[in-house]
Image: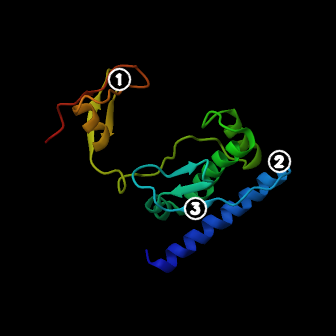
Amino acid sequence: MDNGQFRQLKMQVQRKLSACLKQAEIYFNRTFTMPTVSYEIRGVKAGVAYLQKNEIRLNRTLLQENTQSFINEVVPHELAHLLVYQVFGKVQPHGKEWKSIMLNIFGLTPNIYHQFDVINVQGQTFSYSCDCQTHHLTLRRHNKIQQNKAEYFCKKCKKKLKLSTSNSF
């Protein structure tokens, strides 16, 4: 994608932010400062909100590969985090306040995780298993386990993850 095409995408993101911000201003009957936006996030995260900085960082590759759904879902998702912080202070990241903004202001289902194909952004992974499934951990998490600096557990069965024998080194 050339610079001109990416500039168009950035303009679409700004238009979506402006529209969502306007909806929030009407709903809360107050003004909000437009957040700064950068495209620095790598890996499988679609976006991250930096609350104190009033900043949103987006994954350029996932934006380019999933333009409409990214703009319609990820941009409001991250803006909702900033709005929650500005209106309610420090609360649960995906708590009732965030869900309320997603539903009542933006009219969106409050999904915590995106469903984008991450094959082009995920990097090397390692297979770990528990009693119920296989987990694909990043190189960073794998290295932490190998250096005895971290342990990871399955959210479903609560068992400690163990390196699968299928990994080839």
Q: Residues within 10 Å of mark 2 (few under 14, many from 20)?
A: few
Q: Which mark is residue 132?
A: 1
The residue that appears at 29% across and 30% down in the rendered structure is: 149
Q: Residues within 10 Å of mark 3 (few under 14, many from 20)?
A: some
Q: Amino acid at mark 2?
A: Phe
Which residue lies under the disc numbered 2?
Answer: 28
x%, y% of residue 124?
27, 48
Residue 46 appears anywhere in the view? yes
The residue that appears at 32% across and 29% down in the rendered structure is: 150
> Which corner quadrant of the image does residue 167 belong to?
top left
The residue that appears at 61% across and 61% down in the rendered structure is: 36
Q: Amino acid at mark 3?
A: Val
* Mark with earlier residue (3, 1): 3
Query: On the rendered structure, is 123 left or right of 78?
Result: left
Location of the C terminus (image quadrant): top left
* Mark 3 and mark 1: Cα distance apart in space: 39 Å
Q: Amino acid at mark 1?
A: Cys
Labels 2, 1: front one: 2
Which residue lies under the disc numbered 3?
Answer: 37
Q: Residues within 10 Å of mark 1 (few under 14, many from 20)?
A: few
Up/down of 156 relative to 22, above or below: above
